[in-house]
Image (tube, rainbow, N blue to C red):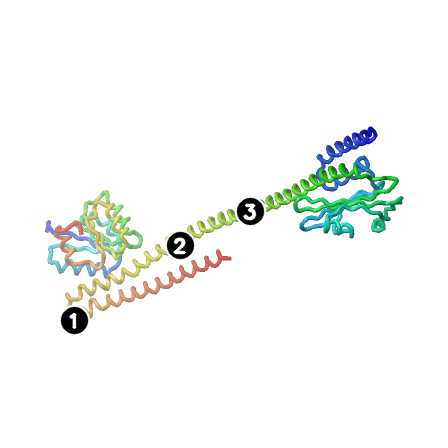
Amino acid sequence: MKNRIKILLVDDQKIANFIMKKVISTLEIDCEILAFEKPEKALLALDEIKPNLIFLDLNMPILNGWQFLERMQHNHHANVVILTSSIDPADEQKSKEFPQVISYQTKPPSKQKIRAIITGENHNN
Amino acid sequence: MSLYENKYRVTYEAFSKFSAKISKVDTKQELLSIIESHLKYLFNYKFFRVLIKDEDSLKSFNIFYNSRYPAKLIQDNIFEYEENLLAKNIPLYQDTDAGFLNEYKEPLELYEGKLWGWYFKYQDVKLCVSLISDKSRPFIIKDVEILNLLIDSFFTKYQQLKLRNRLNYKNRNLESAINVIKSQKLQISKIVENQKDIIEQRTRALKQKNNELAEISRLNAHSVREPLSRILGLIEIADLYSLEELKSEILEKLKLSAQDLDKALKDVISKSSKAIEKSSGEELLEGE
């Protein structure tokens, strides 16, 4: 299936990925979901997977969300959605420095907003 | 007549010398010395005395003819005839054996001794001027004229010195007051400067502590919110599961997340109380 949307979940919390998978699955959109708990592995797999959309956590060991963004910046054109439990406005401000970031969402994820992002109806929220 | 005229010409010359000398004196003692050394050129006497009574003091000095001791200004010594003079202001002329002078131990050897006394008043100051003369050194009525001039010159200089002393004293007081003010001003500016330093130091320390505490609270908020967001997410998707699935799929994850939240909260509380302990400990140290 060539047009199938490839979605990458990067979060060191297994349960967080579990929740996102469930949320996306209820949207009944034809897509392929791949989840990584280790961001450094996800980064290495980017070339092979070539995802359309990445849901990225910020606070992770070894490679945090910001470092992940910096390393992927020049090689990949996937859209990134920040999905974080942080409610610090400074983080949202900083996310705007990365052109591939199309949305900044705080956990828990809202079904309506996730749908809008995946279907491309609303890139700004 | 020409003998008298001649005598008075000489006397006035002596007086002008005396005047020139006293205009240069700087102290009351110098003034007395000049009078003592010049008096015998102005008129005859065996004993000469001036009593000065002003509002708050009684001072006198004595000059004995051919005395071995210099005249001195002393306090609180008044003779009976002086009290009469001060009370009645009538000039005095009477026979005397100078018995009242015994305490001074300066033998006068009088031949028909006479005691003369005059009362002078200059504003608030009263003077009793008296002298003893005898046949060997006779004082005559015409000498009163030169005696008046002498007392005028003496008293003018005396007041001048007194005022100058008072002025000097006031100036010294003023100067020391100014010095006290200066040193107090210096002390105050030192204290102010010191307090400025302390305030700056404290402000810097407080800012740093604030930043540290803000950083701690930021980390805390995140570490607590992470497991909480999982719990909220799990509740959000719980509707999508059957009761059996809830038990097998969700409950365990809820339990784990709740345990993580509990751990994070405990961690936050211990870190915050340590930070508060640390900062209050530093304040105690700074306070010493």
Identify the subunit bearing mark 1. Answer: B
> Does the CB distance between marks 3 and 2 fall below 8 Å?
no
- What amino acid does circle 3 point to? Ile
Q: Quadrant of residue A18?
A: bottom left
Q: Earlier in the sequence, mark 3 or mark 2?
A: 3
Task: Residue B209: give its label.
Answer: 2
C-alpha gap between disc 3 and disc 2: 41 Å
Q: Residue at x 54, y 46 (%)?
A: B186
Q: Earlier in the sequence, mark 1 or mark 2?
A: 2
Q: Is residue B226 visible?
A: yes
Task: Residue B181: give its label.
Answer: 3
Identify the subunit bearing mark 2. Answer: B
The x, y position of residue A25, in whole percent, is 14, 59
- Observer-nearest residue: A111 or B65? B65
SS class, disc 2: helix
- What amino acid does circle 2 point to? Lys
SS class, disc 1: helix
- What amino acid does circle 1 point to? Leu
- Residue under label 1: B243
Please state if B150 lies on the left or on the right of B107 as rendered: left
